Amino acid sequence: MIEERLQTNGKTPSKEFKSIPPGSVVGILGGGQLGRMLAIAARRMGYRVHAYEPSPDCPAGQICDQEANAPYTDTTALEEFAKGVDVLSFEFENIPKEAIDTVSTIRPVRPRGEVLHICQNREREKLFLRAHGFPCAPFRVVHSVESLTLAVNELGTPSVLKTADFGYDGKGQIKIESGANLAEVWQSFCSPRGVLEAWIPFQAELSVVCARGSDGQTKPFPPSENIHRNHILDLSIVPARLAPEALTEATRLASAITTALDVVGLLAVEFFLDPDGRLLVNELAPRPHNSGHFTFDACATSQFEQQLRAVCGLPLGSPELLKPVVMLNLLGDLWKNGDPDWTSVLSDPMAKLHLYGKSEARPGRKMGHICLMADSTADALKRIEAIRSSLS
């Protein structure tokens, strides 16, 4: 193991922070596509990478030096994994807090476990945002049909009931319309606690991925305009086709929230832009984000390299956008008749194909993405839609 060294680079970190230089071993909790792309960035910079994932032959494990397969409840396996690395990070939120607590006694985990604990639960996340004065949709915490009834009376309809835990891509959500039978809604909810949010008639969705280093410096990436289909991200468009004032405010808020959470690593902040031009924070994710995949090809530093730099205590890179870009998600639906023919993608010299190495394609499952760069957003959109048509 390479001994950790204290790095200040002439700056005074808010807390003692050990740098993890190239040649060290980075451990990733989670084996999905985000971990895969983090591993690619780390391998390029000379790090060794180990992945911990319950399922074998995971996308990250295909890139890593070692892949450990065991449940997140296996304390012995977690301890052995942590002893074999110099620093740990994670690539998705649904890791039990107890697992983070176990490995953090052996090696540093960045972002810290408390950040994950807040962001993996909508109740804690919303309460954090409200306590720090960050704008979000009006909400109430509910735990029974009685509290749900009171919350609906206060917030009105339509409104959205969301599970406190384990919700993503629209899962764990119920839209409540006027006249709904709330007893039946609560019975079908199948969760002991939830968050009821007022319905926001937004004009656009956008997100900002923000990096924060060990010295407290934040470097946000350009805001991404996001278009969803069936609650799953379909397109990310950068530069976003939104008012400059909204983009500036989104960047400011993302940096402020990242600092308030004391993140060392990445934080993705998703926003609604309401019809009056006000931004409301929708969700937080303390990791690389699907809407930030454009950075892999179109920015001076990708979100994955930036995550690596931050968690290893290295200076952050430039998030500068080099060229307008549109990212298209590739879902398992494309594989309904077998492997797609990628000729139309690769025929465009500015299209970049990223496949995640997943063994089974299912409808709605993220199997890969395409980034297409052009001289203008309009041209990138036109060409990506032509590629979509050829694949469908």
Image: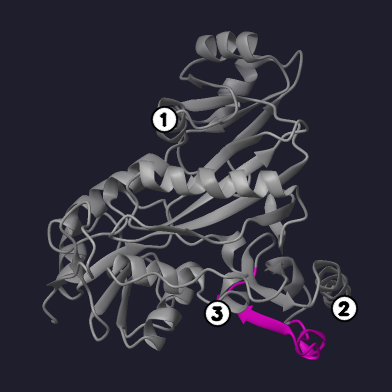
Residue 276 visible here: yes
Quarter-of-image position of residue 175: top right
Report crowding for label 1: few under 14, some 14 to 19, many 20 or more residues within 10 A (C-alpha): few
Q: Specify whether 9 is left or right of 385.
A: left
Question: What percent of the width, then of the height, locates residue 49?
Answer: 32, 80
Amino acid of disc 2 = Ser
Establish if 203 lies above or below 308. above
- Which residue is disc 3 drawn over? 357
Q: Which residue is mark 1?
A: 132
Q: Earlier in the sequence, mark 1 or mark 2?
A: 1
Q: Is residue 266 above or below residue 369?
A: above
Report the span colored magenta: 340-361
Please report the residue visible at 44 percent of the width from the left and 30 percent of the height from the top: 123
Q: Secondary structure at mark 3?
A: loop
Q: Where residue 284 appears, x then y in whole percent? A: 49, 45
Query: Which residue is nearer to you in this view: 216 or 116?
Result: 216
In front of the other: 354 or 192: 354
Q: Which residue is mark 2?
A: 390
Name the kind of residue labelled 3 in the image.
Gly
